[in-house]
Structures are given as C-alpha cells and as structure tokens.
Image (cartoon, helix red, strand yellow):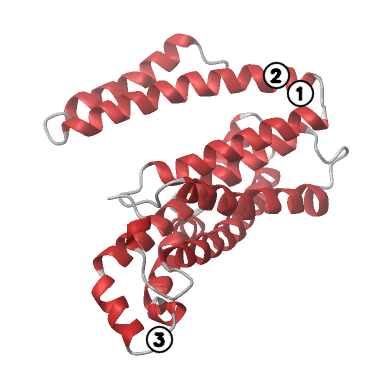
Amino acid sequence: MIQLSHTDLALAALLVLALALSSMRIYPGIARQLLVAALRTAIQLTLVGLVLKALFANSNLLWVTLISLLMLLIAGREVMARQHRRFAGRWGYSIGVVSMFVSSFTVALFALLVVVGNEPWYQPQYAIPLLGMLLGNTMNGIALALDRLTQSAWEQRAVIEARLMLGHSAQEAMTDIRQQVFRSGLIPIINAMAAAGIVSLPGMMTGQILAGAEPVEAVKYQILIMFLIAGGAGFGTMAAVHLGVRRLFDARQRLRLDRLQR
C-alpha cells in the first residue's frame, strides 16, 4: 500500500481551507463550523489510530467494551447536537443513546456472532471498525428523523391538537408525520444502496481495494456492511420516532411542546 506523507494530507486540507474561505461570502457561520469539524477530524482520527494500534496488539474484551461504550455515548450526543428543535434536558440525550444502541450495538453483535464468526468474536480488528461504520452511518438517518419529527410537530401543532380534540389518540394524530419522519430517516441509506457500484464506490470497498484486497472479496464485505447499515438505520429510526412521539405527549394525551428547546 502506498504510504501517505504529512505533506499529502496538508495538500488535501487545502481543499477544506479553500472551501471555508469561499463560503464566508455566502454563509459566514458555516466557515467556522467547517474548519472546526476538519480540525476535529484530524485530531480524533489520529488519536483513534494510536489507540487502535495498541488495542490490536493486545486484544482484550474489557477495553473493546469500554471503547465501544464511549463511541456510543458520543454518537448519542451527536445525534441531538445540531437539531433545530431538540428535546430539552436529559431526555434528548437519552433518546439519542437508546436509538444508537438499537441501531448499531445490536446489529454489530449480530454481525460479529452470527455472520462474520471470527474468533474471538470481540477481536478489535473487526469489532471496532464495524461498530464505527454502523454508528457513523445510522447516526445520520436517526438525526434527520428526529429533527424532522420535532420540527413537524412544532409547525403542525394546530393540526395535531385539532385531531386530539376530535378524539384521535396521540399515535393517530401523528400518523402522517411518523410516515414522513421514517422516510426521512431511511432516505440516506436507500440512496447509498441504489447508487452503490454505479454512481459511487462505497468507502469500505474502496479502502480494501487500495489496501490490496481482491475486488470480489471487497465487494462481499461492502454488501454486508450496506445491509447491516440498512437494518440498523431502519430499526434505530423506529426506536427514535417511537420514543420521540411518546415524549411529545403526556399521560393525558396532550401535546407538550414545552419539552422542546426553542
């Protein structure tokens, strides 16, 4: 595999810097977010590389579990961090963590124990990258779904309350919104699967090919990952929408928008 130098990475970083400078004329606020995100990417991935190097040299279930839990907690925060109207207090964070657990942890365990079947099953070479890909990809769908849910409930509060006055339950009053929200959560992975191999070569497949793996074997792993992400995103979105709708209503079936940050 061709080794990349620090100069190579610096040249690639110039693209992000050029984009940030260009975007200042259009939307000044996004330039700072872009630069901070790029800096975080470089620092976080460097640290992860050092941690994984040590972890691969000493496979230990306790350390794999601790790192996995840390990834889950951070993903749960990121799900709620950039939403326009998110749930206030610990509830918003809890919904994010539970949804990410359903979407990624359970699916990753299924893949490691049933599909891949490596020994030991928690071998960090497989467990950490697999969980990371699931968390990163399902996080986008769940974040989009929750953002759409809270925003739609806020904008359509008059319609929802009218349905409640007509005797509809909370679930019935939110039926069409839930359908739209679920669709929003699955659009990213549906688009990715529909375009895979024709419009784009997915990241994992590309990485394996660049590392020298046989293309057919790389394709098998990519198909596995795409199917796992689809299942995780779907079930995670279901869990997030279910918990979000329950939080939007109290025990007396009243819409409680005061539980959202304004």
Quarter occupied by the N terminus: top right
Relative horizontal placement of residue 207, taking residue 144 as reference (left or right): right
Mark 3 touching mark 2, by CB under 8 A? no
Q: Residues within 10 Å of mark 2 (few under 14, many from 20)?
A: few
Dot label at residue 53: 2
* Outermost left residue: 25
| Residue 249 rendering spot, x and y as whole percentages | 43, 68
Q: Nearer the viewer, mark 3 or mark 2?
A: 3
The amino acid type of the residue labelled 2 equals Lys
| Crowding near the residue tagged with mark 3, few <14, some 14–19, many ≥20 C-alpha atoms within 10 Å | some
Q: Are marks 2 and 1 in contact (CB under 8 Å)?
A: yes
Q: Quadrant of residue 155?
A: bottom left
According to the picture, the residue beneath numbered tag 1 turns out to be 56
Q: Residue 125, can we see it?
A: no
Local SS, label 2: helix
Instruction: Give residue 172's quadrant in the image.
Output: bottom left
Residue 142 position in % (x across, y down):
48, 54
